[in-house]
Amino acid sequence: MNQAVAAPTTVAAQRAQRRRLISRALANPLSLAGLLIIGLLLLVALIAPWLSPYDPIQTNVPRRLEAPSGEHLFGTDQLGRDILSRILYGSRISLRIAVLTAVIATLLGAPLGLISGYFRGRVDDLLMRLTDMFMAFPRLILAMAIAAALSPTLENVIIAISLAAWPAYARLARSVTLGLREENFVEAARALGASPLRILGRHVAPGVISPVVIQVSLDMGGIILTAAGLGFIGFGAQPPTPEWGVMISEGRTYITDQWWVSTFPGIAISLFVMGFNLLGDGIRDILDPRLRSVRG
């Protein structure tokens, strides 16, 4: 009878907590601004084929390097392609890179951090030395090295950035796990004979999710910048792909006279990064109890 009553109570408490988090997100100006920007970009990415006035790849050399006008709102590039259409389609590529990279890096790093922090000893030493090897290099430099070793394709960009980003999630998951493994509820589960896999899955992993989600939201902007940087130097997506870093690279030759070729893709990257940074700061304020207590 008690269990029958406790189950609905637990479900109701979880629903109430979710409602509180949603209300805090909507009341927090940082998260609200980030949500609006990211929501707009998501909408643009989803309906890009219907918003784009022209084919983003189709060239029209007689109309090359035309200034912004009523016919071409953002002007045309060196091959006469409509820049607005290329930016709209580029939002889909940037979003794909950001989401897939964040998912792959989290799936690589977080489980290793959980295992390392819980078992410690030789397992911890081995996994953390491997993590230190990857963290010894700046993320962009490591991503460049991996991308250079692979063929320059969009899929390899995602792989390169993921391999450069996972150590941060491993370190974070390990630090949280080290604290959780000493908590009373974990000790109680261990005393009752629960297996390490069960303890990790049901008692430790839920406590790691919140800080990892915060870290992912804060890293999304950096992932987009890294992808744009790889595209700019030629290690990422290749022309004629409408990727924002590639577009900036193609327009740098004309920056003094035909400024629009590089400027509008740069503004798109800035908006994307700002949106994710605002959203990440807002999520951190909402989920971190220490910040909530300080800010009242």
Image: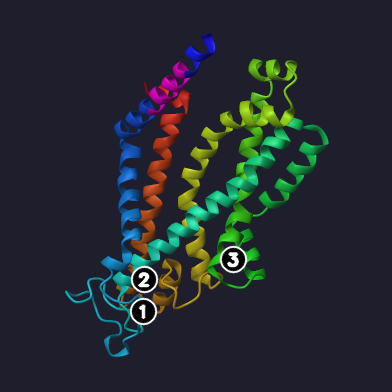
Q: How far is disc 1 from disc 2 in space, using C-alphas? A: 8 Å
Q: Nearer the viewer, mark 3 or mark 1?
A: 3
Specify the amino acid type for callout 2.
Answer: Ser
State if disc 2 and disc 1 touch (CB < 8 Å).
yes
Image position, residue 135 (x, y; %): 66, 49
- Colouring: rainbow
Q: Is residue 10 magenta?
A: yes
The three-letter code of the residue at mark 1 reads Tyr
Q: Determine whether, in the image, residue 211 is placed left or right of residue 63.
A: right
**Residue type indicated by callout 3:** Asn
Q: Secondary structure at mark 2?
A: helix
Comes first in the chain, label 1 or label 2: 1
Q: Which mark is residue 254?
A: 1
Q: Which residue is mark 3?
A: 156
- Measured in 3D between alpha carbons, the distance from the residue under mark 3 to the one under mark 2, in whole angstroms, is 24 Å
Mark 2 closeness class: few <14, some 14–19, many ≥20 residues within 10 Å: many
Q: Which mark is residue 262?
A: 2
The x, y position of residue 68, in whole percent, is: 22, 74
Q: Residue furthest left?
A: 70
Q: Which residues are magenta?
A: 8-18
Residue drawn 45% across and 71% down?
Answer: 246
Name the secondary structure under disc 3.
helix
Residue 63 visible in the current orientation:
yes
